[in-house]
Amino acid sequence: MNMKTLFILIITTVMGITTLFAQTNYYTASKIFEGVGYKYKCNVSSSKSVILYSCNNKLTGQFPKYKATGVLFTYPVEGVKLYQYNAQLEKQIRQVVHAAFSKYSQPIIVDKSLYIIFYINSESGSVDELEFEFVNFGPYSQIPIDVYREIENRIKDSIHFEITEFGKTLNFVWTSREVSSYCE
């Protein structure tokens, strides 16, 4: 290896390391993000976990109640399903996440997981609200807020759960997914 090749290799390596460590962490502290036509709240706990959700959410932190009585529904109830499992729906969710992240930092987040909480309309099965959960020292902290907004909009537009008769007795259905950005 000649000196010129060695020099180029060293410079390329240093630039790569600098780029790796120069990534912006958007979610270091609790705050409000404002975009065109939307606001998101970011709550960062002392354990460095991030909960990210639209300021328009009304169900964040709530749990389903029985419509008839207002009594809190307690998970899990053995043998009771709130919606029908659908493998195609699960694949669609992964595809939405993959499509949004593929424009940004796909190589750093492959095989990492993002938790998405779905607040689902118990009558229609449509997704009314979402929240995202991740750690603020991981790769998802480097993804701009507009990407999470894009995921939320696409999921609301394209994902519908099939609610069971029991699920329809609740004011809403809550579920979560650990979604890898990698899509088979």
Image (cartoon, rainbow, N blue to C red):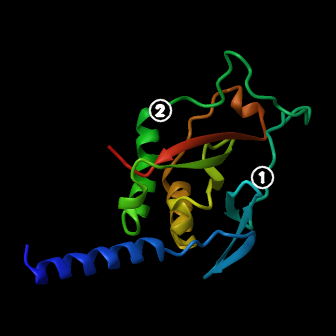
- Amino acid bearing label 1: Leu
Using residue 117 as the reference point, say whether residue 73 is left or right of it.
Answer: right
Measured along the vertical axis of the image, is residue 71 above or below residue 99? above
Q: Residue at x 69, y 40 (%)?
A: 174
- Dot 1 lies on which element? loop
- Mark 2 lies on residue: 86
Estimate how packed mark 1 is, as few (under 14), some (14 to 19) or many (20 or more) residues with alpha carbons within 10 Å: some
Using residue 168 as the reference point, say whether residue 136 is left or right of it.
Answer: left
Estimate the x, y position of residue 67 in percent, counting from the top left. 84, 36
Estimate the x, y position of residue 70 in percent, counting from the top left. 91, 36
- Amino acid bearing label 2: Asn
Estimate the x, y position of residue 89 in percent, counting from the top left. 46, 40
Using residue 67 as the reference point, say whether residue 48 is left or right of it.
Answer: left
N-terminal of the pair, mark 1 or mark 2, is: 1
Using residue 107 as the reference point, say whether residue 77 is left or right of it.
Answer: right
Measured along the vertical axis of the image, is residue 36 above or below residue 119? below
In which quadrant is the N terminus drawn?
A: bottom left
Estimate how packed mark 2 is, as few (under 14), some (14 to 19) or many (20 or more) residues with alpha carbons within 10 Å: few
Estimate the x, y position of residue 90 in percent, counting from the top left. 46, 40
Quarter of image, res 109: bottom left
- Mark 1 lies on residue: 59
Measured along the vertical axis of the image, is residue 36 above or below residue 121? below
Quarter of image, res 124: top right
Disc number for residue 104: none
- Dot 2 lies on which element? loop
